[in-house]
Image: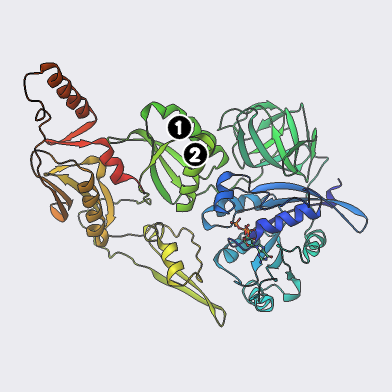
Amino acid sequence: FLVEDIRNFSIIAHVDHGKSTLADRLLELTGTIDKTKNNKQVLDKLQVERERGITVKAQTASLFYSFQGKQYLLNLIDTPGHVDFSYEVSRSLSACQGVLLVIDANEGIQAQTVANFFLAFEAQLTVIPVINKIDLKNADPDMVEKQIEKVFDIPSDECIKISAKLGTNVESVLQAVIERIPPPKVHRKNPLRALVFDSTFDQYRGVIANVALFDGVVSKGDKIVSAHNQKTYEVNEVGVLNPNEKSTHKLYAGQVGYLIAGMKDVTEAQIGDTLYLHNHPVEPLPGFKSAKPMVFAGMYPVDQSEYNNLKSAIEKLTLNDSSVTVHRDSSLALGAGWRLGFLGLLHMEVFNQRLEQEYNAAVILTTPTVPYKAVLSSAKLIKARRAVQQNMMFIDQSRVMLKYLFPLNEIVVDFYDSLKSLSSGYASFDYEDAGYQTAELVKMDILLNGNIVEELVTIVHKDKAHTVGKTICERLKDTLPRQLFEIAIQAAIGSKIVARETVKPYRKNVLAKCYGGDITRKMKLLKRQAEGKKRMRKIGNIEVPKDAFIKVLKTQ
Ligand code: GTP
């Protein structure tokens, strides 16, 4: 293919506006997949994507399309819509010259429509607005056209109105891709310059790097160098994604495809890395802003003997999802594990589910927290900041866009759900990091008869201390076995007690049922009791079973 016959584009949208359905239709129209089959979200390959009906990973497919007697190569990169995965979106865009911005004809512009539009706009890509679901009874494409003109300053005659579900007018989307999106600006005669924009791990073949070629050619057998680690590799396989891998022996500048080059270590296929030919060094391409984790949680193997297996599973999965950060951590209660950083709660749940489904791992995930920067001072004098309104814009008579500054820990856990239920599902939400703010945070200790339980020390906002403390005390009360004496469970900030529960005493005499002198039976029972004690942790004179911590720390 000549460079001028290639188009690299992406589909972006608010969640559920129909990206994956449109991708299915484009794949069918171009004969990439069989039309007769019941195609549903073909690019959503992961089990978690199919179960939840959402796209998590960006996927790539090369489509061949004839238009006005000419054959074109269209590289389509499907992207996720949920706010937690916008990192995948910005990465995919770096390999594209244009986007299809899909907007539901019923719902109109939503939070991620705006967020994704600006990602494309900042990357100076051509934006083609596609109004989808015009078959719906309440569809109002004209209203959406006006919104697009007002919010994005795109003339309404540039909007394409379609039904991805029924296939109505989808052909004109392909034509717009060819007519409006420019071919990639690349030079085939220059030495190879390829951007690694994604990578996956295959059990048998090692690292599979998804690459976009900006300059030159790469062939099977070539020796290539990673600009990042300066190591040399031999290319074992190159090809296009169709949408499954199809080996082609060569990839040319302007093309998007994959490459396997014996990279085994997860650190070798850095996303954002530039690959070039051995002895032909080039200026590396600008990489990506690294993703910034917002939510942190501890992850531990259910059984410590599984530590190494879990370690390798996490390494492989983070190769496929480089936005997760991993640091080793250990907890008195849960043993050796990691502290993982995620882009949001859904991201955390999906990562956990993928570990379980794709790697068969059994893990304990602790309650998520957000990062704080602590400044040690005698008084925390400055008032805590609550949500502060920044800006307001009317999209039309019935819709308004509000911008607020929020403390992150107020939004990560259940803000999205509350917003949805308060607005009967109408409101949508997107966020970006606004930096650290001072806040009145306190360290809360949990005490058992006056002794601090180190495993349960947490940082909370002063106003939330009572509620959080109460929940932890109640959960502990439910899980602590009664002992020979009364146990006071307290949540304290410094010397101030903010919540309290009591576990009543109980006398458990394991020998009570042994009348008579059967000494071997008595010994057996005492031995069993001693074994039980090994699984206990002693805090003061209180024996706490390890799973009590798990129950208190776990998310569900
Ligand atoms: P994420 O991948 O989670 O971001 O969602 P998405 O934007 O890819 O949406 P998807 O294609 O999964 O479609 C969401 C829902 O809308 C599905 O139930 C589709 O069947 C439905 N849908 C998509 N296009 C149309 C359409 O043209 N008309 C109607 N009526 N429904 C549609």
Looking at the rendered structure, the kind of residue marked 1 is Leu
- Secondary structure, mark 1, is helix
Please provide percent x and percent y for residue 19. Answer: 66, 58
Compare residues 66 and 25 and report the one nearer the observer: 25
Residues under numbered marks 2 and 1 in contact, where contact means CB atoms less than 8 Å apart? yes
Which residue is located at x 33 percent, y 65 percent?
385
Splitting the image into 4 quarters, where does residue 380 fall?
A: bottom left
Please provide percent x and percent y for residue 260. Answer: 69, 31
- Res. 184 visible in picture: no
- Res. 253 visible in picture: yes
> Is residue 19 rendered to the left or right of residue 448?
right
Splitting the image into 4 quarters, where does residue 53 fall?
A: bottom right
* Residue topped by disc 1: 310
* Residue topped by disc 2: 355
Figure quadrant, ligand 1: bottom right
Which residue is located at x 48 percent, y 51 percent?
343
On screen, residue 473 above or below 356? below
Splitting the image into 4 quarters, where does residue 447 fall?
A: top left
Mark 2 / mark 1, whichever is N-terminal? 1
Q: Is mark 1 within 8 Å of ligand 1?
A: no
